[in-house]
Every structure is written in structure tokens, then in C-alpha cells.
Amino acid sequence: MSNYALILAGGSGTRFWPLSRNAKPKQLLDLFGSGTMLRQAIDRVKGLVPAENIFILTNHLQEAEVRRQAAELPAENIVAEPARRDTAPAVALGVGLIAARDPQANMIIIPSDSLILDDNAFRALAEDALALAGREAALITIGIKPTWACPSYGYIERAVKLEDAALSHNCYEVVRFREKPDAATAAEYLSSGNFSWNAGMFIWNVAHVRSQLATHSPELAGFIDRLTAATDLPAFIGSEFPQLTPISIDFALLEKADRVLNFEATFDWDDVGSWISVGKYLPQQEGGNVSNSPLSQVQAGNNIVFTDSGKRVALVGVDDLIVVDTGDALLVARRSEADKIKNIVSGLPENLV
């Protein structure tokens, strides 16, 4: 029974404008000088599965750059979705591609835009989960232990711990998935101690997930069946994938599945969802400022500064700002308004999007 990995790399990056653009979103950027998030994701799973068993799903705008960054993977393992259809159709496409190679395979699905520094701890848990997927009829998730009452994440409610002597990590039966809560509800989840953040990482046996899709999402199951029988994959994907109903994998399958398990992550994790998150990893400067380039300041504090040129930035009498400078655009925003950066993109000239 072989192991495979599927990396989802088709997301947009409007929260990181002006550095991110449609053709080069967050996962394709080197934000911290340690390689792009996509490159890190590839290296992370290369320790789990051989390169020929790694698949990447992207889109046509990002395909060329993804292929450049993943040049060691077989060309046919990088597939561009012809239309945006949310995570369930993307996962079904990945399951179908792997099922065509090995219908009994185990597979892990990870996003390309999460920051994980401890790859060894990730791989140790993933190996445990892949082995469990081969012997348990269950869909498996990896959850993050909440560190604060975050209303921006989905939550996974857990019940009893799975008793399995072969496991070296804690794994729990899942009660239900909870959508992004309000602040008060998130606080309740945090205090209860039996919730984890949904990190969008999944592990399962291909045959089992296909049987679950046949029960709970016949449209996606039928798509996979036809894909595995297709003789011209690009033509099949181009004609059938855009017809699939846009829906998340949580709604389409996980909330309905017969049995779901949840491993609690033993590794660090950050979804790096905004410039505020990026600021946590930039070099500390005087006055509580952070910057990836030389910085001079006079009575300026708690600012985040990022340039793609290494130019010196001078701040005088300003606090709590985000300043991002690229070759063709400059962003200045209050830290408290970071979530609104994505809203400016719709009004920009096409060459800046």
C-alpha cells in the first residue's frame, strides 16, 4: 500500500497586496527569506513520500510559477484546475488522480500556504496518521490546539481519545465540525479544551474516501469514477471539472462522514493570514518595529515594514502602520485595518492585480 501527497496550491493572495498578485499569491512568495511556502510544503512531504507520488493542484494563472518551483516533480503530477470550484471538487480531483495510479493508496492533503517550522515533528505525526488510515475505516484530520479564541478559523469538536497501542500521537474521535464562530463562542470553545482549529489537513485511504463520497456526495464520487476511466485526462478535466458544484470539503463530506478522527498537532503552525502574521517573523527593530530591510525611526513604533528591494525606510512620528513597498506599488495601512487590504484589490488597475 503506497503513500501519496496532494498539495493544494491554487489560492489567491489578496491580503498580501501589493506583494501578492493573482499570478503570484502568498504560497509562491518568499516572505521570510527561507523559500516560498510552496517550496517548503514540497520539501516537507518529500520526507514522507517519493517525489513521483507528490501531486500539486493549482490554477492556470499560477501554473507556470508552480512548475518552476516544483521542477523535480513529474510534469503530469502538476494539474491546473480550469475553474475555481472550492475545496471539495479540488480534493475529488486529487483523489481521482491518485486513484488512477493506485486505488488502494493512502494519501495526505495539505495546503501550500501554511507556515510550519518543525518539519520533523510534522512528518512523525503524518506517518502515524497515514499508517492509521491504512487500518481504520475513518477520515482523518489534523487539528491545531487553540492558543486564543480566534473567530476566523473553523473548529473541530473532539470526544474520546482513540485507544491504539500502535499510535505515538494523540488521536480523538470527532463529534462535529463547527464553522467560524463569533468571539463569545470561540471563547467557549477555548475554555472547554476539547476543540481544535481546523487546519485543512486530511489523511485517508483512497478506497475508503471514495466509498464515503459515494454515500454522501454522489456527484463527486461519479466524477472520480469517470476520471479514473478517462483516456484523455486534460480534456476530461477541462470539460467536467467546471461543471462540479462549488462547495467546501467540510460541507460536502467531513460533516456527514460515518467516522472522522482528529490528531492534535505536535508541531508549530501558522496560516500567515495577513501582514500582521508576517510581522511576527520579521527581524525586530528599535521601537517595537519589525522590518525585512534597513529601518530608521524617530518616535515611531509598532510598525510593520516590508520591501522587496532592500531599500532603507525612514519612519517619523507614526505608529501602528503596515508599510509595504514593491517596484510598482506602495501600501500604507493601519495595523487595525489589515483585514481590509483585500478590499482595495477590486478597484486597482488590472496590471496591479
Image (spheres, rainbow, N blue to C red):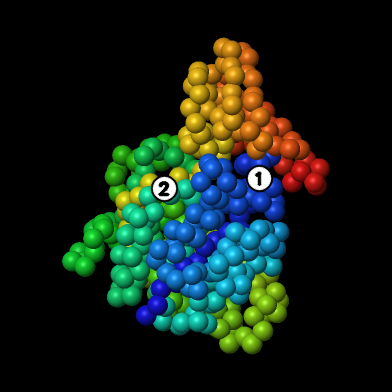
Q: In the rendered picture of this protein, how many numbered marks are placed on residues?
A: 2
In the image, residue 198 lies at what x, y percent?
Answer: 43, 53
State how far apart marks 2 and 1 are (Cα).
22 Å
In the image, residue 92 lies at what x, y percent?
Answer: 54, 71
Q: Nearer the viewer, residue 21 or 150?
A: 21
In the image, residue 271 lies at what x, y percent?
Answer: 49, 46
Q: Is residue 340 visible?
A: yes
Residue 140: name its quadrant. bottom left
Q: Which of marks 2 and 1 is in front?
A: 2
Rendered residue at 44%/58% (across/down):
44
Residue 179, numbered circle: none
Q: Nearer the viewer, residue 296 or 55?
A: 296
Q: Is residue 260 visible?
A: no
Categorize mark 2 by other alpha carbons within 10 Å: few (<14), some (14-19), many (20+): some
Left or right of 297 on screen, residue 195: left
Disc 2 target residue: 117
Rendered residue at 29%/45% (across/down):
193
Q: What residue type is labelled 1?
A: Ser
Disc 1 target residue: 20
